[in-house]
Amino acid sequence: MRIALSQITADPRPERNLVTVREEAHLAAESGARLVVFPEATMACFGVPLGPVAEPLDGPWANEVRAIAKETGIVVVAGMFTPSPDGRVTNTLLATGPGVEASYDKIHLYDAFGFAESDTVAPGTEVVTIDVEGVRIGLATCYDVRFPELFRAHADAGALLSLLPASWGAGPGKREQWELLVRARALDATLWVAAVDQAEPVPTGEEGGSRKTAPTGIGYSTVAGPDGTVRGQLESGPGLLIADVDTDEVAAVRRKVSVLANRRLDRP
């Protein structure tokens, strides 16, 4: 399966980001990709009030993403914010396109490195997988990558690939952690991991307030194989990473490295 990872820098304005999603989805489709993945917070970047931009899954922003998926003929996965009953928002991935209509609410919230996502975002509770042209795919978001049990749950559900949209926080050692964690999750669940981050923002001198400390991305979107090796990676700036995922390789790796079968703890 050919997939595309679209490393963009989201704007605070959702309507501007839809223009980018449309352009990138068309480029992905032209490359032969059957799936294009956008980062966490594609709807609007972190560091701005999320409540005013949040919309339900049947709202205009999500419906426009559905229209983009329909016109390109491929599955689109993009991060957005939906209203939560408790007055916060939910950090949601929308997955939509031919034969696919699903959403995943981020389970593990980024209450780390001085940032408290849970102040404004409510956690999800459900493990979610989708099927794209016969391939089962797990959905995860950013800070989820620090929790291997989620990726093992994807594997237990039959997934051969996990998608990981992110808006990774910058800081000392954070790039190294990102690369290590993406590879580790592929290796300890023995599946492909396609991790797409927001591109590193270009300083404009206009950023202020919470946007200075918000996790707005560092780039380095990465595709890791089920053996933990890097099969493709971008640098810090915007870009479109095209990768061919050999799903048969998962079974081959699992025959050699039977970590899922050999588990003694955390079995379903």
Image: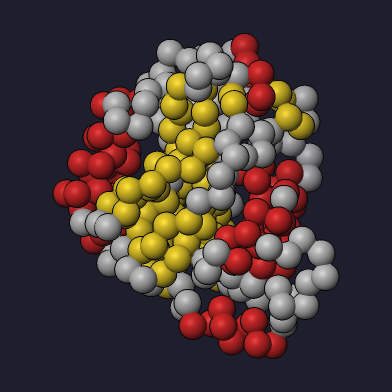
- For this orientation, the residue located farthest to the front is 268
Residue at the spot x=41%, y=19% of the render? 53
Residue 118: where, in percent of width, then height?
66, 24
Relative placement, left or right, of 253 versus 17 is: right
The answer, for residue 16, to whether it is visible in the render is no
Q: Quadrant of the C terminus?
A: bottom right
Is 201 or 105 nearer to us in this picture?
Answer: 105
Is 181 or 106 nearer to us in this picture?
Answer: 106
Residue 189: where, in percent of width, then height?
66, 67
Query: Is the residue 133 above or below the residue 83 in the image?
Result: below
Is 81 or 268 nearer to us in this picture?
Answer: 268
Residue 74: where, in percent of width, then height?
27, 57
Q: Quadrant of the N terminus?
A: bottom left
Relative placement, left or right, of 235 versus 254 is: left
Query: Is the residue 140 above or below the residue 198 in the image?
Result: below
Residue at the spot x=49%, y=83% of the render? 248
Residue at the spot x=78%, y=72% of the render? 263
Residue 171: where, in percent of width, then height?
74, 36
Specify the color scheme: secondary structure
Residue at the spot x=71%, y=56% of the render? 148
